[in-house]
Amino acid sequence: MAETAPVLVNHRPFEPNPILSLHSTDSSIIKPHDSIAVVDDVEIPTVDYFMLFSDDLDERSKALEYIGHVCKDFGFFYLVNHGISDSVFEGVFKGISDFFNPTEIESRKQYEKKNPTDRIRWGLRSSPGENREYLKIIAHPQYHCPTKPAGFSESMEDYFKGLREVVQGLGKAVSKALGFEECYIEKAFKLGTGFDVSAMNLYPPNFRSKGSIGVPDHTDPGFLVSLIQDVNGGLQVFSNDGNCINVNMPTNAIFINLGDHLEILTNGKYKSHVHRVVVDNNKVKRISVATLHGPSLDAFVSPAPEFVDDSHPPAYRGMTYKQSLQANGSDEIDVQSSIEQIRL
Ligand SMILES: O=C(O)CCC(=O)C(=O)O
Ligand SMILES: [Fe+2]
C-alpha cells in the first residue's frame, strides 16, 4: 500500500511514563470537580496508520507490535497519517458549526427524543451534571443526517466514508497485533454491518455552562471510539495508573479510545478507558465528533475462547450488541455503556 516511507511518529517501545507522576505538582494541573490530579503535557502515544500497512515488512511488523503495546498498556492513542484530508475535517467543523447556529435552536427541536427507534436525536443539556448541545445520528449501516443546513449531511458523509475505511483497517491491525488472522475482529464483530453512532457535541451549550462538567465520567460501548475536535480543551482520559490526562492532540489527528466490546471480546486484555469532558469556566468553545464504532447489532459478543483459560475465566456475560445497548434501559442511539451490567 505504501509507496514511500512516511515519517515514524513516536514509534518506540512502550515504557511507563515517569512524567505522569512528576507532573502532579505542575502548574498545569486543574482540579475541575474532584480531588484527582489532572495532568497536562503527558504523552499520549501516537500511532501512524500508514505504517500499519507499510510494504516494508520490518516497518509493518514494528508498527503492529507498537499498536499491540499501545492497546494493552494505554488503551487510547492519537492516530495520524490516517488519510482523511484536511478539507474533509474543515467541512465537518463548518457543517456542525452551521447546524448549531444559536439563532436557530427552535428548528433543532424537531430532533428531540420521540421514541426508542430514533435514528437522529438532538439534545441540549444544561445542568450541573452535563453541559453540552449534541446531535446524535446513526451513521452505519444506514446513514442518517438532517438535510439542513445545506452541505452539512454531505460533509458528514464524506467524513464517515473515510472513517469506515480507517476503522476496518484498525480492525485488521488490532487482529494481527493480537496474533490472529487479519479478519479476526471483522468476523467477531461483523464489522461490515457494524452499528456506528456519531455524537456531534458543542461545549458549552448556549455559551454558558452550569458547572464544570461537559460530559461526566464514562466508557463507551463498541469496538472503538474515534474522536475529532476543532480545538483542544476539555477532553480528559484516565490512564491505567489512575491519572487524569488532558487530551491535547495534533491538528486533524483522530483520538482513538478502545470500547467496552473489545474489552469483552479480549476478556479484559484490552480495556476501555473512562473519560470525561470539562468545561473550564466557558473559556473554550469547542466542537467534537465522537463516533462509536460498534459490532453489528446482531453480533453475539462474549469473551473469545482464545482469551479464556483456567487462570482467566470469562469475566463478562455474552449477548448480542443490541441486547447490550438495551441492558441499561437506554435506546440504541444513546449508546450508553452497560459494561457494569455485563461484567460477571
Ligand atoms: O466531546 C468529547 O470530547 C467526548 C464526548 C464523548 O465522550 C462521547 O460523546 O461519548
Ligand atoms: Fe465518550
Image (tube, rainbow, N blue to C red):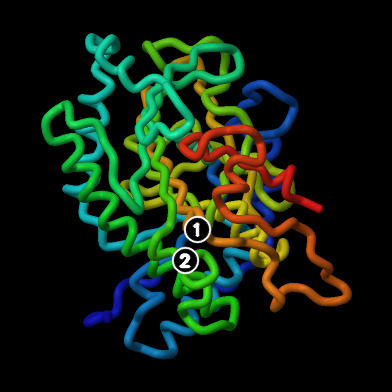
Q: Quadrant of residue 148?
A: top left
Q: Is residue 171 above or below residue 25?
A: below
Could you say where residue 170 lies in the image, as x and y percent from the top left?
44, 67
Q: Is residue 294 left or right of residue 82?
A: right
| Mark identifier at residue 190 | 2
Q: Earlier in the sequence, mark 1 or mark 2?
A: 2
What's the amino acid at mark 1? Pro
Could you say where residue 12 lies in the image, as x and y percent from the top left?
53, 72
Q: Residue furthest bottom?
A: 57
Q: Residue furthest right?
A: 310
Mark 1 and mark 2: Cα distance apart in space: 6 Å
328 or 64, which lies in front?
Answer: 328
Could you say where residue 159 lies in the image, as x and y percent from the top left?
26, 49
Q: Is residue 3 above or below residue 241?
A: below
Residue under numbered circle 1: 295
Residue drawn at (50%, 22%), measured in percent from left and top?
279
Residue drawn at (48%, 50%), measured in percent from left and top?
225
Q: Is residue 2 left or right of residue 42?
A: left
* Local secondary structure at mark 1: loop
Q: Is residue 23 visible?
A: no
Asked whether the beta carbons under mark 1 and mark 2 sit within 8 Å of each other, the answer is: yes
Q: Residues within 10 Å of mark 1 (few under 14, many from 20)?
A: many
Q: Quadrant of residue 263?
A: bottom right
Q: Quadrant of residue 1?
A: bottom left
Residue drawn at (50%, 34%), measured in percent from left and top?
334
